[in-house]
Image (cartoon, rainbow, N blue to C red):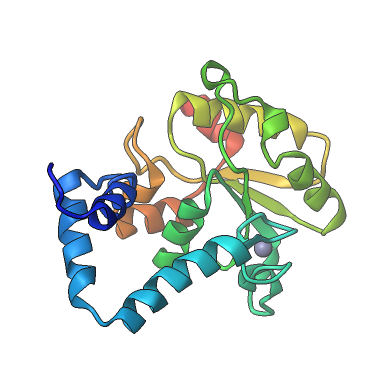
Amino acid sequence: MVFSSALIENAVNEFSRLPGIGKKTALRLVLHLLKQEPAQVQQFSDSIARMREQIRFCKDCHNVSDEDTCSICISHSRNKQMVCVVESIRDVMAIENTQQYNGLYHVLGGIISPLDGVGPEQLNIHSLVERVQQKGVTEVIMALNPTIEGDTTIYYLSRRLKELPVKITTIARGIAFGGELEYADEMTLARSISNRLPLESYVQQK
Ligand SMILES: [Zn+2]
């Protein structure tokens, strides 16, 4: 792609670094911004810069937050005895969209994957065990992707929590093996949450 302006070229290059955005799409976005009022474009770039600078992670559940504690953890209407363990903040959003779950979350920040060099110590596992020990949690729902790594992580977590007086459940496997939570339709995800299984019966079925 040949540009007559280095300014345009730089902007196109920045956009094309985003996932799923090729050079052509990047150029279309840049030309669109060029048609906007400068103040509007300023607002656009400010909101992105401010988001990146000011974003925090909830000290309890590691979800993204504007404050030390996220809006879910601080809410009085949530069931604080129930904690749903997910891989990433995208999974929190996916489950929140079903409007079927009223407990809290715990974002692991990844999944155990020895091939990618991700071990338990890189994930928010210690804080999960602490929460269960100290915050009166009675049920931990494992809502991880149905993959080998997801199952490995569930197995590891169940061993770490084994000695504690907490019920461990997994979401029902309405989602195809090898699939990803964030791409499941809301019905499948909602049903998986409401039909969650005790860990023992999940292991028996395999
Ligand atoms: Zn939180």
Does 154 appear above or below 89?
above
Spot occupied by residue 4 in the image (x, y as percentages of width and height): 15, 52
Using the image as rendered, state which of residue 44 and residue 181 is in the foreground.
44
Is 71 positioned to the left or the right of 195 in the image?
right
Q: Quadrant of the N terminus?
A: top left
* Residue 4 in sight in this render: yes
Q: Position of residue 41 (x, y in %)?
A: 33, 75
User: Is residue 47 or residue 144 the one in the foreground?
Assistant: 47
Which residue ends up furthest to the top in the rendered image?
A: 115
Q: Is residue 146 above or below residue 195?
A: above
Q: Quadrant of residue 121?
A: top right
How many dots with numbers? 0
Give the residue displayed 70% in from the left and 46% down from the top. Answer: 167
> Quarter of the image holding residue 79?
bottom right
Q: Point out residue 184 in the picture as x, y percentages from the top left corner.
A: 32, 49
Outermost residue on the right side: it is 134
- Give above or below for 176 relative to 103: above
Decide if residue 19 is on the left or right side of residue 58: left
The residue depicted at 40 percent of the width and 65 percent of the height is: 98
Percent position (x, y) of residue 152? Answer: 57, 25
- Ligand 1 resides in the quarter of the picture at bottom right
Q: Image check: 100 left or right of 31?
A: right
Is residue 206 at least partly visible in the picture?
Answer: no
**Image point (40%, 40%), residue name:** 173
Instruction: Give the residue drawn at x 17%, y 64%.
Output: 31
